[in-house]
Structures are given as C-alpha cells and as structure tokens.
Image (tube, rainbow, N blue to C red):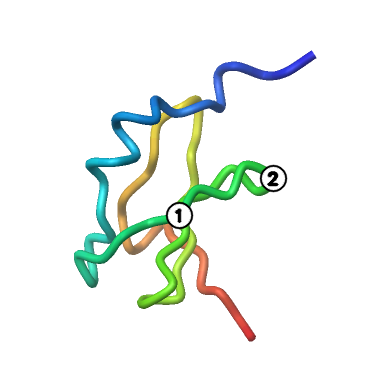
Amino acid sequence: MEDRTSRVDPKLLELLVCPLTKGRLSYHATDNELISEKARLAYPIRDGIPIMLISEARKIED
C-alpha cells in the first residue's frame, strides 16, 4: 500500500525552486526529497510538505 501522505502536488513542484540557487529541483520519490543539482542539496518532504530550508537540507556527497 502506498503512503499518500508523502506525495506532493505536481503543480506545487513546478513552482518550487532551490532557495539558495533559485534553480530547478528534481523530485526523487525513492528518497522523498527534492534535489538541487547546482547546490548539491536534497530538501526533505515531510507529510507531503517540502521543507525548503537550507538548514534542513542534506548535503549530497560524490
């Protein structure tokens, strides 16, 4: 059974940008995160709400 509380509205995802670079974000369903390739940050999605705080983002390592 799929957990629908972790899903984000696709229209909302089209509007969101990285708060650091103002660049596009890509959605990674397996990790339930929004990824900023430019900033190398992954923003978590909790209960269907993207947490767009730099302090809450996970740094993406090589």
Mark 2 is on which residue type?
Thr
Q: What residue type is labelled 1?
A: Ser
Residue found 39% across the figure and 39% down from its top: 50
Q: Residue at x 22, y 61 (%)?
A: 19
Disc 2: which residue: 30
Q: Distance between the residues labelled 1 and 2?
A: 12 Å
Counting from the top left corner in percent of width and height, residue 23 is at 26, 66
- Residue 59 sits above or below residue 54 on the image: below
The residue closer to the viewer here, 59 or 26, is 26
Q: Are marks 1 and 2 in contact (CB under 8 Å)?
A: no
Q: State the image coordinates of residue 17 (x, y, percent, origin top left).
A: 25, 54
Look at the numbered disc 1 and give the secondary structure of its residue. strand
Residue drawn at 38 percent across, 56 percent down: 25
Q: Which residue is drawn at 26% across and 46% down?
A: 16
Is 16 drawn above or below residue 8 in the view shown?
Answer: below
Could you tell whether 44 is left or right of 50 in the image? right
Which of discs 1 and 2 lies nearer the camera? The answer is: 1
Q: How crowded is mark 1: few (under 14 residues within 10 Å), some or many (20 or more)?
A: some
The front one of 37 and 52 is 37
**Can you give x and y, in whole percent of width and height, for residue 47 in the image?**
50, 25
The numbered dot on residue 26 is: 1
Is residue 53 rendered to the left or right of residue 35? left
Label 2 secondary element:
loop
